[in-house]
Image (cartoon, rainbow, N blue to C red):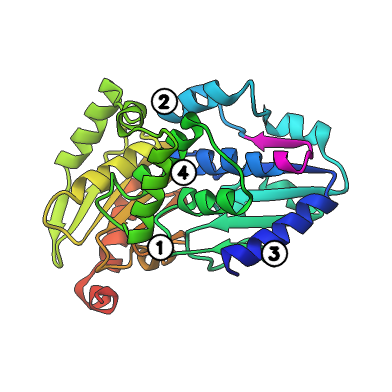
Amino acid sequence: MTLKEFKLDLDKLINISDQVFLVPHLGADFDAISSCIAMALIVRKYKKPFYIILDEEPTKIEPGVKKIVDDICTKFPIINMEKYKQLSKDNDLLIACDVNRDYLLCCKDYLHGFKNIAVIDHHEDDNGLKTSYKCIDVNSSSTAELMVDLLCMNNIKVDSKIANYLLAGIYLDTNKFTKNVSFKTMDINSRLMKKGASIDFVNELFEEDFLSDRKVQQLVNKANFFTYTIALAISSDDVKYTKEELAKVADYLLKYKVDAAFAAGFIDNDLISISARSKGRIDVGDVMKKLSGGGNVYSAATKIGNSSIDKVGEDLNKILMPDFCKNLIK
């Protein structure tokens, strides 16, 4: 449905609900957390109780995202799943922001407890959450971009801090305005900057932790380049990464003369993650679907359990063989 249609449904859903829970995807990034904050402003307009569910250990939250969480926690109620179970009622509304797949939600085992579920996202909707209330716009650079329009439709003004958080979401998902950027994207950025958003502030949120940056660069150095200018970085099995670090590796590799980049590594003892990025000629979302993941043309990912890093590398290599790539090039 269009954003205008989604707004009308959202008006109805919030009005008939007793309380609203907002949830980003696991491993929340700038786009996901800023979208939840923007949605919280909309729910607040209706004077309904609301909560942002963020069920992650503080030490595992990406540093820039943690800065935002620490800043907003006194103004926006942030809860974990234990608290949700205490607060849940029969007439609850769940709004998933920047995510449309159940396995990417910390509340995936409790979806049956919500009277209604709404989704706003910019990723492909294949096998997504089962609900009629969806706004999925794969042409948007980010969910934050959609949320700026939705805030305007609701006549909600934002201060410079929230404008900065939304700008950070767009900045992240466009790889600092180097991919998937449209006239609409730049118009949204201009509107946010008029509200006080600053690229300097956003860049501070992106400041790298030294040790994390070293890990990223070491994996970049291990990348192999092969047919159709695809970069593939496979980590060793004795190093753990965060999903964000793997995404940074894939983003960094796009600086070179490649059409797409993939970075794979362990994010937990028995869990491997692959982050994929593209300049648009290769549909990395299609590639990740073949490994039970998803995404869109420009950005995609998957998680693989109970496998070896060598096996994952071999499987990815087979998928990326020339015959398959020919079908992906536009």
Q: CA distance from mark 3 to mark 2?
A: 33 Å
Q: Secondary structure at mark 3?
A: loop
* Residue linked to disc 4: 31
* Residue linked to disc 1: 296
Magenta segment boundaries in residue numbering: 44-53
Q: Secondary structure at mark 1?
A: loop
Q: Secondary structure at mark 4?
A: helix
- Which mark, residue 323? none
* Residue linked to disc 2: 63
Q: Residues within 10 Å of mark 4 (few under 14, many from 20)?
A: many
* Residue linked to disc 3: 131
Q: Residues within 10 Å of mark 2 (few under 14, many from 20)?
A: some
Picture coordinates of residue 49 (x, y %)?
Answer: 78, 36
Q: CA distance from mark 4 to mark 1?
A: 15 Å
Q: Nearer the viewer, mark 4 or mark 1?
A: 4
Residue visible at 32% across and 26% down? Answer: 204
Circle nearer the N terminus (2, 1): 2
Residue 130, above or below 60? below
Front residue of 271 and 228: 228
Q: Is residue 243 visible?
A: no
Circle nearer the N terminus (3, 2): 2
Circle nearer the N terminus (3, 1): 3
Q: Are marks 2 and 1 in contact (CB under 8 Å)?
A: no
The amino acid type, in three-letter code, at marker 1 is Asn
Q: CA distance from mark 2 to mark 1?
A: 26 Å
Residue visible at 72% across and 62% down? Answer: 9
Residue 277, by quadrant, is: bottom left
Q: Are marks 4 and 1 in contact (CB under 8 Å)?
A: no
